[in-house]
Image (tube, grey):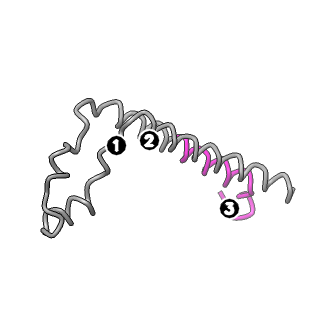
Amino acid sequence: MSDQEVGPNICISAFNEALETSKRNITSAAEANPICWPGPETMLLDSNRKEHLMAKRYLPELVWSSAESIEQFNSKCNLVQNSIAEKLCIYF
């Protein structure tokens, strides 16, 4: 596809498809996490220790896979999609 063939609609469709894929992947990962990884034991690490800093930096929050967190994520993705669509209506 040449540069002349790439228009706003193609770019927006690709962006929306990527958002939908992200939503599906995160929902699937949350559903596959029945044991609530990472475990609450990570909260017991001494906050002054290197282990705590590494856990905080590299592990997700304990509630990342909760239904509420996933719903918030999906809602924000939908807001982004709607915002882009509204802005396009203004320009085109």
Of 7 and 52, nearer the camera is 52
28 vs 3, left or right, is left
Q: How many marks?
A: 3
Residue at image position (48%, 44%) is: 22
Can you say whether 10 is above or below 57 in the image? Answer: above
Residue that badge 2 annotates: 69
Quadrant where the N terminus sits is bottom right
Marks 1/2 in contact by CB < 8 Å: the verdict is yes
Residue that badge 3 annotates: 2
Residue at image position (71%, 46%) is: 82
Among the two numbered marks 3 and 1 on one chain, the one whose residue lies closer to the N terminus: 3
Q: Badge 1, how many Cα within 10 Å: few under 14, some, many 20+?
A: some
Can you say whether 59 is above or below 57 in the image? Answer: above
Among the two numbered marks 1 and 2 on one chain, the one whose residue lies closer to the N terminus: 1
Q: Secondary structure at mark 2?
A: helix
Residue at image position (42%, 39%) is: 25
The kind of residue on which mark 1 rests is Val
Q: Badge 3, how many Cα within 10 Å: few under 14, some, many 20+?
A: few
The residues bearing labels 3 and 1 have C-alpha atoms spaced at a distance of 45 Å
The kind of residue on which mark 3 rests is Ser
73 vs 34, left or right, is right
Q: Residue 78: horizontal and vertical position, in percent?
A: 62, 43
> Which residues are drawn in magenta?
1-20
Can you say whether 69 is above or below 35 in the image? Answer: below
Residue at image position (21%, 59%) is: 55
Residue that badge 1 annotates: 63
Q: Secondary structure at mark 3?
A: loop
Of 5 and 50, nearer the camera is 50
Marks 3/1 in contact by CB < 8 Å: the verdict is no
Q: Secondary structure at mark 1?
A: loop
